[in-house]
Amino acid sequence: MIQDIGTLRFHNEYKKQDPEEKSRILCYRNGEALVRESGNGQITFPTYRELQAKGTDEAKTDIYEFTYLFRIDEVAYFLIPEEAANRFLEGFVWKPVSVFRSAVPKDAAFAGITGYQLWQWYDQRKFCPRCGQKMKKDDVERMMRCPVCGEMEYPKISPAVIVAVYKGNQLLLTRYAGRAYKKYALIAGFTEIGETVEETVQREVMEEVGLHVKNLHYYKSQPWSFTSTLLMGFFAEADGEETIRLDQTELAEAVWCDAAQIPEDDGVSLTREMMQVFKAHVNKKLEFHK
């Protein structure tokens, strides 16, 4: 999956610090990221050293605000505002963040989309939701604080479920309505206030395809920074009536699919991994667990 970066380690603990020469610089605007492409899906990000080479004196002043994000192994990643991007335009291009679904190396793709999630949060927390004053970054933790009323805002993470609904050797596959992503997916939805994730599974399946489910099995979770979501994957068996009653505002299609026809894994999403787990379950009689 997108967060699986081999032997490299992701360090998300916050610590206010200055960039080093090898630090990577992330920059975003309106759903796009600044990257360098080198063919076959390979991407890289600007380094602080490159920024210095473009304008040594300016790079060392407060003209740019470097916001520390995280480290992958010993390489730190920093965020800079869009207006600083003109320092990098030679050799770098703006690409939709969807590029991170297929970009390599995997650690760059994961860093790029995780940085995007944090950029969105910072961009949407410029002003206090309580009193309207300008928020300030905290020096101790990743948090925005209002200097007037004391309101504290932390990064947004929305819990959601992915549900692999099955009956016998068939899996329920869906296509979203009105979205750019047109490939087959599984039932999904956000957890509402006051409900458990198990209740979310039952409600979302009923709302989207009109089915009852039983025998819920939790599989695993995935951070999905494209939508600031923490996904929780469940397998669930169809219970009783198996006729699909499609919610056409949410889905364009929902079909029962034989295991042999299930699409291959994309190496990125929990959805596709769960499809492969079901296929393996049918072919080798495996249990639904990690």
Image (cartoon, rainbow, N blue to C red):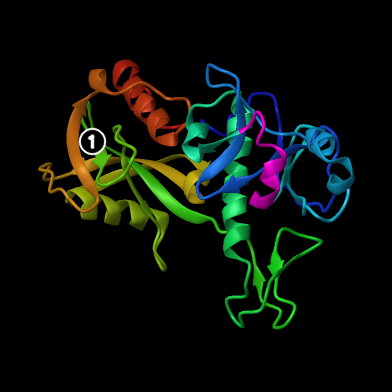
Secondary structure category for the residue under label 1? strand
* Magenta segment: 81-92
* Label 1 environment density (alpha carbons within 10 Å; few <14, some 14–19, many ≥20): many
Q: Where does residue 161 sit, x and y in percent of width and height?
A: 40, 48
Q: Nearer the viewer, residue 227 or 60?
A: 60
| Residue 155 visible in the shown view | no
Residue 43: quadrant of the picture: top right
From the image, tell me which residue sits under label 1.
172
Q: Where does residue 271 sit, x and y in percent of width and height?
A: 39, 35
Q: From the viewer's perspective, is 102 left or right of 134?
A: left
Let me know if residue 86 is in the magenta part. yes
Amino acid at pointer 1: Leu
Q: Residue at x 42, y 29 (%)?
A: 273
Q: Nearer the viewer, residue 72 or 36?
A: 36
Looking at the image, is 86 positioned above or below residue 281? below
Q: From the viewer's perspective, is 142 left or right of 247?
A: right
Q: Residue at x 21, y 53 (%)?
A: 249
Q: Where does residue 278 sit, x and y in percent of width and height?
A: 33, 27
Let me know if residue 168 is in the magenta part. no
| Residue 45 visible in the shown view | yes
